[in-house]
Image: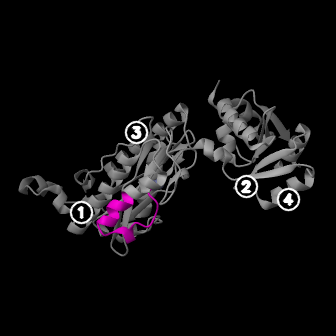
Amino acid sequence: MSEHPKRRERLIQQIVSEGIDAVLVSNPVNVTYLTGFTGDSSHLVVSAAKTVLISDGRFTEQLAEECPGLECHIRPPSQPVIEASAQVLGSLGVAKVGVESGHLTIANFESLKEKLRTVAWKLGGDRVERLRQTKDDGEVAAIRRAIRVAQTAFTMFRAMLRPADTEKELADSLEMYTRRAGGDEGAFPSIVAVGARAALPHAPPTPRRVSEASLTLIDWGASAGGYKSDLTRVLFPHNNAGILGANGVVPSKLVEPKLREVYAVVLRAQLKAIAAIRPGVKTGAVDAAARGVIEEAGYGDYFTHSTGHGIGLQIHEAPFLRAGFEQLLEPGMVVTVEPGIYLPGVAGIRIEDDVLVTPNGSEVLTSVPKDLETCIHEF
Ligand code: ZN
Ligand code: ZN
């Protein structure tokens, strides 16, 4: 059995356990996950008896390519997708139907209720999202590929990095390297942040130049075959390459003492969080592992976000490594681990890797070096 029917099988078990007859899947990412279809404007009805993809004539050929054998209902251009979905649900004679309350708009829900007056509706925010949390082998392979692409793009990025480059130029060229390395596109708009700009965890790129500060933060990822990768590294650009070896200066001494200290704290926090990852551990405990190191070093107030998030078809998806979260890690989950310290007006340092939860522990899937010496970038 290919992976998509298996995924639908897991959803059907969920439907049965909830005591409902069918689910209307309206979130396009979830439709892709369950069918392999990558187009939009399409819904999926899943019931124990039947699965029907509701789409339109623009996608007939793509549907045949991407999900052969799947029953499709092709609506006419004049019929909105929600009405076609109501029609399919009506024809199945289902009495209790689940909807994706995290995605379906109120207007569309009203329209469903209007068209199917006898149906009892059950809201559910994360039925398919919960299935998506644990990746099957094909998905892990796809994430590994998205990581390879991102890492190749970063090698090109470092090879081409020049002091006069601006954040904007670098973010744009990273997108190009990602595509050239075999990615479909960047997993999200890359963050390239020079000096104090790096204190903004999601800094939009500006005309600031690499040469204007002693540090550049890069947060990037690739989308390949629909799956995403997500990494962050900080580079310390330096242009005394020729002198270095001659006078025997230890490269790490080139980084300002304060930044060196903060970098060491973030790296320690990240390694501690990674070491905490294994099945059965609470997601909140992984956050606590990173946060504990940063708090102990006196920078607790400057770590202003969660430790990590799941990656897959989306760049941010469950599970989330957040303070106090009780959810347990399971084999097959892939999460980022990305603690950071942000000193307003000075700089920000974040280190981010992607980690697979394995049956016995974890595997760090990303392999861009992160010890301070390797992040000193000599022009
Ligand atoms: Zn990131
Ligand atoms: Zn991230």
Q: CA distance from mark 4 to mark 2?
A: 12 Å
**Mark 3 vs 4: CB contact within 8 A:** no
Q: Residue at x 56, y 38 (%)?
A: 225
Three-letter code for the amino acid on which mark 4 is drawn: Glu
Q: Residue furthest left?
A: 247
Residue 327 among magenta residues? no
Q: Nearer the viewer, mark 3 or mark 4?
A: 3
Residue 98 appears in the figure: yes
26 vs 234: above or below? above
- Label at residue 110: 4
Three-letter code for the amino acid on which mark 2 is drawn: Ser
**Mark 1 vs 4: CB contact within 8 A:** no
Left or right, residue 1 beside residue 370? right
Q: Point out the stretch of residues depicted in magenta.
A: 290-307
SS of the residue under disc 4: helix
Q: CA distance from mark 1 to mark 4?
A: 57 Å
The x and y percentages for residue 21 are 81, 40
Question: Which residue is labeled 1 in the image?
Answer: 260
Question: Which residue is labeled 2 in the image?
Answer: 101
Left or right, residue 165 beside residue 25? left
Left or right, residue 258 beside residue 200? left
Three-letter code for the amino acid on which mark 3 is drawn: Gly
Q: Earlier in the sequence, mark 1 or mark 3?
A: 1
Question: Which residue is labeled 3 in the image?
Answer: 361
The x and y percentages for residue 335 are 47, 47
